[in-house]
Image (tube, rainbow, N blue to C red):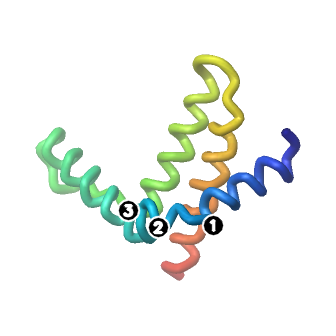
Amino acid sequence: MNTPDILYRSLEYVGGDRETTHGNKTDNHNNIARLWSGYLQNKFKSTDVSVSAQDVATMMVLLKIARTQAGSHNIDDYVDACGYAAIAGEIADTKE
């Protein structure tokens, strides 16, 4: 699979019918951020922990990169990383 193929597949994922299945991506990442923040605050007994929707998307990119380091080659790790990076960029852009 070449670079444009990876990017096009990622576009299909983030621009397709995923919103029907998972809801609005920004709302979804905000919900995940609240849950992760609450979990981390409880775990570390600190209210100083705050995860944003952009953090969630960025950390999902890191998760996908980490997956490329173990197991067998899976092109979806790269496709998904592109998608999460695009979501992080969209969230960051809407904050401006």
Q: Quadrant of residue 2?
A: top right
Q: On the image, which quarter does residue 70 sit in?
A: top right
Question: Which residue occupies the foreground of this view, 14 or 16?
Answer: 16
Nearer-the-camera pick, 37 or 72? 72
The residue that disc 2 covers is: 20
Residue for point 50% across, 46% down: 60
Could you tell me which secondary element the residue under label 2 belongs to?
Answer: helix
Q: Which residue is under mark 1?
A: 15
In this view, 83 is above or below 25? above
Spot occupied by residue 5 in the image (x, y as percentages of width and height) = 83, 49
Residue at the (62%, 65%) spot, across then down: 16
Q: Secondary structure at mark 1?
A: helix
Amino acid type, callout 1: Gly
Distance from disc 1 to disc 3, alpha carbons, whole Å, reads 22 Å
Q: Amino acid at mark 3?
A: Ser
| Front residue (pair 21, 56) | 21
Mark toward the viewer: 2 or 1: 2
Q: Earlier in the sequence, mark 2 or mark 3?
A: 2
Q: Amino acid at mark 2?
A: Thr
- Looking at the image, is mark 1 or mark 3 earlier in the sequence? 1
Looking at the rendering, in which quadrant would you find the N terminus?
top right
